[in-house]
Image (tube, helix red, strand yellow):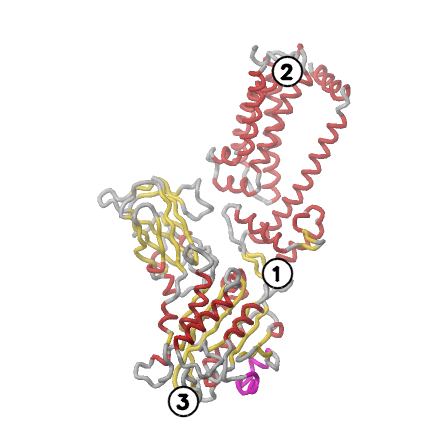
């Protein structure tokens, strides 16, 4: 039981750290300096990190507690939810900078696509972490994606 | 399968009456987004107004006020008693641009004041020793300089005011325009106050204490301290009194006010009153006089950097200009500077550390390697010394700089940039700057920060312009033509008031370089 709470706490801590240090994390990826400056000036790093974090936690919660079905508890069902998170989180996260830059007449499409690949990677990683944080209290999906 | 998923979700949401929670969440997110969108629009407005030139002027301010007023409900942090709190808005703008990339110091040029231009209060000393500066037989430098200054002021001249000072402060009886066209200023003001005594305590108190947030006070004076008691001929007593007078007045003002002190020369034909000869002596020759410009730290900075005050700030162009110095507690300047990665004087190898640099300017270097044979590292900087009330000779004197780093470092030269210095590789950094500064480290052992300070010293020209005895205008050394009795203690009183505010040294600016191996 304690182990489960430790996993939950770790998931929360990692998510919070990701949001807090989002600027440092994204800037370590060595993207185009001008693009990074624009992202920084528009405070988009933290907005995007928060969006990804909230999306990932909601998708995981929906899977483990709302759906919570025996007939939807195989590893590939979990993968469908991961794909859903990958579809939703990076799409929302590309929307904010794209609309921001479009309004200012700036073209950073290639940089945004690069940035989106990073976000897909972060979403996958975070979804795995969050799944291992919250799955323990699911009555029907606690063994997904990997049995206990 | 999908049907199952949806039915499960719907069942859970509606079955457990969570619809309200969901609705509240949506409302909360929409509300937050709406608030953020106003904030974002406001930030965008600020960027469009000030990102390019770094200036928020009177017209920009009107647009900012208009935006806040029409969205007042979303900007409660800027409101105070249902009015826009200009200081908090300015603080927000300054912080926002300081945290942007590249960071920018914002100049508020007539912003938040309700007035587009600063109000100028001119204080003209009318003591007996001032009258010969405007003698009809003279060359007219004195009047010429004052009129040049007044004519270079932007805005409506009648918004400004003129005072005559000697044993008190008196309003000039005519208009500003009349003053400029006045053929004989001192004749017109004859009979105002007591011309035989200059009450510096009273004058400086007026110049400093009646200087409002939107004001610039200009004192034109010979800066000769005189005592109320005509019987006092003990110079030590006079000097001590002069120093303590300025110190006492400056005590509470030094942290907010800056003083630009300018020395000029003019022909002087008439009676001069030495400290020990109350009836005066005739003198025909050159004499120094001084202009003291006083204002809030931000206003003095504004004078140097605002395009509207460009003409006014060209003090070196005034007829008879000799020297100037700025007394200020503030590290008032933040010049542009950048390391040049391509220069003939560069010794060793280095690369710009793009992660640490702010915008195009290079302040941080990585892969720094000194010369293999000599172990010497020589770094060349381009620095912009424009828009400063600091003389070129002071800026280019390496003795006026303090330089700190772990390994021994020195400035070897500071020179104005010449056309021949500009190459294709350094053009961008050179065109933004006015001078090249060469730094030399005899060794470079580890990662370190190099800090360069331009010290705000009590300047030598004030000491050279001081006289302990003005009783012999005809002395062979001709020092009388360029010196002023009791100038040094008077100005020391001012300087010491600034120095006393801090344990650290007084600096005009500080620039940092970060060197990594």
Residue A44 visible in the picture: yes
Picture mark count: 3
Range drawn in magenta: B176-193
Is the residue B264 above or below the residue B374 in the image? Answer: below
Q: Please identify, in this view, whether the residue under mark 3 or under mark 1 is nearer the observer.
A: 3
Which residue is at the front of the view, B488 or B394? B488
Placement of the C terminus of chain B among the 4 image quadrants: top left
Q: Please identify, in this view, whether the residue under mark 2 or under mark 1 is nearer the observer.
A: 2
Q: Which of marks 3 and 1 is nearer the N terminus?
A: 1
Q: Please identify, in this view, whether the residue under mark 2 or under mark 3 is nearer the observer.
A: 3
Chain of the residue under the numbered disc 2 shown in the image? A
Chain of the residue under the numbered disc 1 shown in the image? B
Contact between labelled residues 1 and 3, with CB atoms less than 8 Å apart: no
Is the residue B509 above or below the residue B478 in the image? Answer: above
Q: Which mark is residue B58?
A: 1
Q: Is mark 1 on a helix, strand or loop?
A: helix
Which residue is at the front of the view, B277 or B14? B277
Dot 3 corresponds to which residue? B282
The residue under the point 45% across, 76% down is B223
Q: Is residue B69 left or right of residue A48?
A: right
Q: Is mark 3 on a helix, strand or loop?
A: strand
Q: Residue A137 carries which label?
A: 2
Q: Is residue B419 left or right of residue B292?
A: left
The residue under the point 35% across, 84% down is B472
């Amino acid at each position: 039981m304690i182990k489960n709470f430790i996993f939950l706490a770790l998931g929360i801590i990692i998510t919070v750290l990701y949001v807090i240090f989002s600027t440092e994390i994204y800037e370590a990826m060595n993207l185009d300096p001008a693009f990074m400056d624009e992202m920084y000036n528009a405070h988009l790093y933290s907005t995007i990190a928060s969006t990804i974090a909230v999306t990932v936690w909601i998708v995981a919660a929906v899977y483990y507690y709302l759906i919570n079905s025996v007939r939807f508890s195989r590893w590939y069902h979990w993968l469908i939810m991961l794909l859903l998170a990958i579809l939703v989180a990076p799409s929302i996260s590309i929307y904010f900078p794209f609309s921001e830059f479009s309004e200012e007449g700036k073209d950073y499409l290639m940089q945004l696509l690069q940035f989106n690949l990073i976000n897909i990677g972060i979403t996958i990683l975070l979804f795995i972490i969050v799944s291992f944080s919250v799955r323990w209290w699911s009555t029907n999906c606690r063994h997904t994606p990997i049995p206990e | 399968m999908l049907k199952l998923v949806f039915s499960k979700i719907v069942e859970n949401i509606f079955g457990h009456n969570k619809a309200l929670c969901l609705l509240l969440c949506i409302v909360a997110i929409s509300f937050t987004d709406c608030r953020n969108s106003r904030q974002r629009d406001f930030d965008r407005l600020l960027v469009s107004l000030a990102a390019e030139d770094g200036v928020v002027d009177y017209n920009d301010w009107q647009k900012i006020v208009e935006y806040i007023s029409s969205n007042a409900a979303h900007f409660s942090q800027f409101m105070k008693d249902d009015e826009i709190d200009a200081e908090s808005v300015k603080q927000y703008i300054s912080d926002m641009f300081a945290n942007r990339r590249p960071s920018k110091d914002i100049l508020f040029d007539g912003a938040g004041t309700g007035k587009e231009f600063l109000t100028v209060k001119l204080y003209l000393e009318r003591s007996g020793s001032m009258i010969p500066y405007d003698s009809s037989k003279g060359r007219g430098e004195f009047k010429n300089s004052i009129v040049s200054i007044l004519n270079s002021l932007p805005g409506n001249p009648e918004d400004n005011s003129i005072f005559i000072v000697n044993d008190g402060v008196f309003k000039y009886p005519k208009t500003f325009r009349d003053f400029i066209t006045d053929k004989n200023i001192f004749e017109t003001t004859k009979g105002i106050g007591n011309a035989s005594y200059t009450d510096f305590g009273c004058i400086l108190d007026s110049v400093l204490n009646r200087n409002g947030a939107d004001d610039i006070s200009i004192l034109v004076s010979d800066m000769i301290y005189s005592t109320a008691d005509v019987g006092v001929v003990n110079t030590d007593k006079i000097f001590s009194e002069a120093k303590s007078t300025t110190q006492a007045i400056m005590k509470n003002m030094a942290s907010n006010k800056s003083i630009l002190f300018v020395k000029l020369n003019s022909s002087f034909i008439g009676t001069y009153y030495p400290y020990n000869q109350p009836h005066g002596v005739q003198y025909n020759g050159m004499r120094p006089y001084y202009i003291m410009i006083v204002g809030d730290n931000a206003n003095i900075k504004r004078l140097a950097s605002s395009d509207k005050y460009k003409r006014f700030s060209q003090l070196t162009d005034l007829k008879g200009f000799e020297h100037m110095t700025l007394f200020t507690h503030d590290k008032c300047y933040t010049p542009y500077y950048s390391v040049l990665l391509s220069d003939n004087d560069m010794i060793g190898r280095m690369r710009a550390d793009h992660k640490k640099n702010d915008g195009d300017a290079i302040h941080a270097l990585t892969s720094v390697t000194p010369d293999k044979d000599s172990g010497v590292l020589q770094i060349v900087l381009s620095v912009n010394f424009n828009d400063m009330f600091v003389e070129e000779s002071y800026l280019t004197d390496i003795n006026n700089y303090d330089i700190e780093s772990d390994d021994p470092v020195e400035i070897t030269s500071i020179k104005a940039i010449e056309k021949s210095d500009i190459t294709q590789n350094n053009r961008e950094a050179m065109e933004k700057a006015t001078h090249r500064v060469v730094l030399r480290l005899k060794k470079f052992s580890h990662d370190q920060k190099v800090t360069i300070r331009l010290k705000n010293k009590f300047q030598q020209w004030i000491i050279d312009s001081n006289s302990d005895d003005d009783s012999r205008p005809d002395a062979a050394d001709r020092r009388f033509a360029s010196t002023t009795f009791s100038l040094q203690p008077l100005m020391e009183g001012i300087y010491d008031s600034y120095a006393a505010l801090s344990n650290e040294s007084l600096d005009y600016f500080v620039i940092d370089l970060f060197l990594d191996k």
